[in-house]
Image: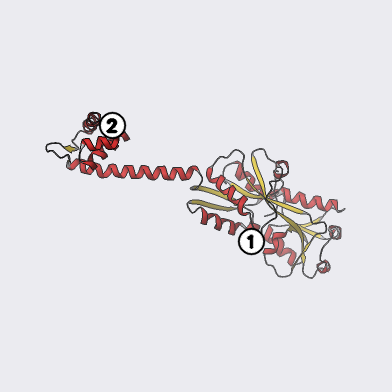
Amino acid sequence: MDLRHLRYFTAVAEERHFGRAAQRLGIAQPPLSRQIQDLESELGFSLFDRSRRRVDLTPAGAVFLAHVRRVFDALELAVHEARRASVGETGRLVVGYLSSLAYSGITELVRAFRTEFPSVELALREMPPQEQIEALKDGRIDVGFVRAPLDDARLAAERVRREPLVVALPADHPLAGRKRIPLELLSREPFIVFPRQRGSAFFDLVMGLCREAGFSPRVAQEALHLDILSLVAAGFGVSILPDSIKNIRRRGLALRPIVGAPSTDLLVAWREGDASPTLGQFLAFVRRVGVGKPRAGRRTAPRAANRAPGEAPR
């Protein structure tokens, strides 16, 4: 038994006439009659009552027709859903993100994506940068948002946002009165930094900027992203953070631009060679709408500048 037998049976059942059914199917009547006989032989019972001029369904045939119609309905739905899946309109995607994005873009991005693709299931995982990189490589997440650089042959990445760095310092700090702060003025300050093992790229960026300014930062404490703000506001030290940190409100905190406007790039990253249509739709959406505040351009940063084994603060 195959779908052809079921189509032939349905045509005869609906037309109640072998000749009309054969015409509808575009075949001759004798082959159609033989196919129906073969089907009845395989089933072990009659589908049609041929004792009168009109072809009627037997009780068994009527029950069989109802179920065959469900088969064709299910097949049509399967084709429809498979077609949608083939272009990424359905499926499941696990998205890793930095904790700072909870305040600067991920909520709006996810809401907009779900509105456009309601049949795609999104699962969000807040993770520090290094954990996202490992999770991407071992398949625990499908796409992540980390900070540049990212240099790993197993991963691909594109820049989705470039943002300046700022100095975070207590509101009553003498430097808080400045509109912009030269980094060399921080040479004697205690620094509060994000742990390197959880985000080596951003840690190395901050250390490198300080060395270029002529000093090595004196690290007083390491802390997670949101804890850094609390410690700075409490007077334990200063920190260098992405500008999007201003979306997180903290009393007693001052944020000032840095002379020379050094910046950091936010990347969207995924496994190299991942051909998932759902991932493709998500990446295309991110390229189109961006993450957080609008930016001037959406050029992809050169790959060599886009990849690295570690990542920035969350």
Q: Is residue 237 visible?
A: no
Q: Position of residue 77 (x, y in %)?
A: 38, 45
The residue lying toward the viewer, choosing from 5 and 260, is 5
Position of residue 122 relative to residue 26, above or below, is: below
The figure's colour scheme reads secondary structure
Q: Is residue 312 left or right of residue 180?
A: left
The residue lying toward the viewer, choosing from 93 and 203, is 93
Q: Position of residue 61 (x, y in %)?
A: 20, 40
For label 1, count other residues whose C-alpha is less than 10 Å away and answer few (under 14), some (14-19) or many (20+): some
| Whole-number angstrom distance, CA of label 1 to CA of label 2 | 65 Å
Circle 1 sits in a helix, a strand or a loop, which is it? helix
Circle 2 sits in a helix, a strand or a loop, which is it? loop
Outermost residue on the left side: it is 51
Q: Which mark is residue 27?
A: 2
Question: Residue at left 48%, top 44%?
Answer: 85
Q: Position of residue 78 (x, y in %)?
A: 40, 43
Quadrant of the frame with the C terminus: bottom right
The residue lying toward the viewer, choosing from 99 and 279, is 279
Quadrant of the frame with the N terminus: top left
Question: Residue at left 28%, top 38%?
Answer: 24
The residue lying toward the viewer, choosing from 142 and 38, is 38
Quadrant assignment, res 182: bottom right
Question: Residue at left 33%, top 42%?
Answer: 72
Quadrant assignment, res 151: top right
Nearer the observer: mark 1 or 2; the answer is: 2
Q: Is residue 96 left or right of residue 18?
A: right
Quadrant assignment, res 246: bottom right
Amino acid bearing label 2: Ile
Q: Position of residue 14 (x, y in %)?
A: 24, 42
Amino acid bearing label 1: Tyr
Q: Which residue is mark 1?
A: 103
Q: Are marks 1 and 2 in contact (CB under 8 Å)?
A: no
